[in-house]
Image (spheres, rainbow, N blue to C red):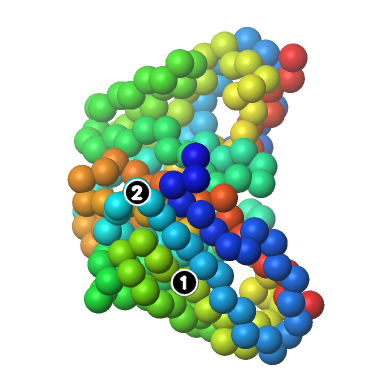
Amino acid sequence: DADVTQTPRNRITKTGKRIMLECSQTKGHDRMYWYRQDPGLGLQLIYYSFDVKDINKGEISDGYSVSRQAQAKFSLSLESAIPNQTALYFCATSDSWLPGQFFGPGTRLTVL
Amino acid sequence: EDQVTQSPEALRLQEGESSSLNCSYTVSGLRGLFWYRQDPGKGPEFLFTLYSAGEEKEKERLKATLTKKESFLHITAPKPEDSATYLCAVRNNFNKFYFGSGTKLNVKP
C-alpha cells in the first residue's frame, strides 16, 4: 500500500547537519502527523497539521520544524541534527470521519 | 496528563495458546481507543477502534474490548503469523493521539 510514502527510507548524517524528511499521501486526508519511535518508548508525536494553514506542536517538538506545502505533503526538518535524534520516524494521515491513522513505512535516521 | 500503558512488554505463546494483552489509559475526553499491529521495519497497521465502555470488535483471531480504564486485545488460538508488536493508542478531545510502548508478541509453532 503506497498511499503514504516517506523519503528517504534510510539516512545517515553527522551532528550539526540539516536534514529534511518528506511525506506524501494520495489518500486525500486533511490531517497529517509526524511521530518518532524509539525502542521501549512507543510513538511520540512531534508535530501535527489538520489542514494546510494549521500546524501544531506535539509532545517533543524541540529541535524539529515542519512545513505543510500542500494537503498531500508534510515535511519534517531537523535544523541541526544531534545524536539523540537517532530514531525511526513515521508520518501518518487521518481524517475527522476516520477511525484511525494510516502510517507510512518509516524513515530510519542515524545521526553520528 | 493523557497516557497509555501496555502490558506485558513481551509475550511468548505456543501456537494455539490463547492470551490477552492489556492497555490501561487515562485521557481527557476519550474520542476513541485504537489497536494497531506493527511488523518489524514497517509502519503500524490499523486494527480496531473502540469508542465506549462495553464495546467489542473482532477480526479473525483477535477480539478487542473496552472498559472505562482499560482495553484488552484477546488472541484466540494464535498462529505464528500473529507474531508482531501490538500498539494501543487513545485520541483525546483535542484530537491528539497518545500511544503505548507496545506488546511484542511471539507465537512459536
Residue located at (25% from left, 67% from top) = A51
Residue located at (74% from left, 77% from top) = A13
Q: Secondary structure at mark 1?
A: strand
* Residue B12 percent coordinates (x, y): 69, 27
Amino acid on which the number 1 mark rests in the picture: Ser
Residue located at (51% from left, 20% from top) = B75
Quadrant in the picture for residue B27: bottom left
Tell whether A103 sits left or right of A16: left
Whether residue A70 is visible to the viewer of this picture, yes or no, is: yes
* Residue A80 percent coordinates (x, y): 62, 88
Position of the C terminus of chain B, as image quadrant, is top right
Classify mark 1: residues with Cα within 10 Å, few (<14), some (14-19) or many (20+): many
Position of the N terminus of chain B, as image quadrant, is bottom left
* Residue A86 percent coordinates (x, y): 68, 70
Q: Is residue B64 depicted above or below A13 in this figure?
A: above
Residue located at (70% from left, 16% from top) = B14
Sequence-wise, the earlier of marks 1 and 2 is 2
- Residues at marks 1 and 2, CA–CA distance in whole angstroms: 17 Å
- Label 2 marks which chain's residue? A
Q: Is residue A66 depicted above or below B105 in this figure?
A: below
* Residue B55 percent coordinates (x, y): 26, 27
Q: Secondary structure at mark 2?
A: loop
Closer to us: A103 or B76: A103
The residue where tag 1 is placed is: A75
The residue where tag 2 is placed is: A27
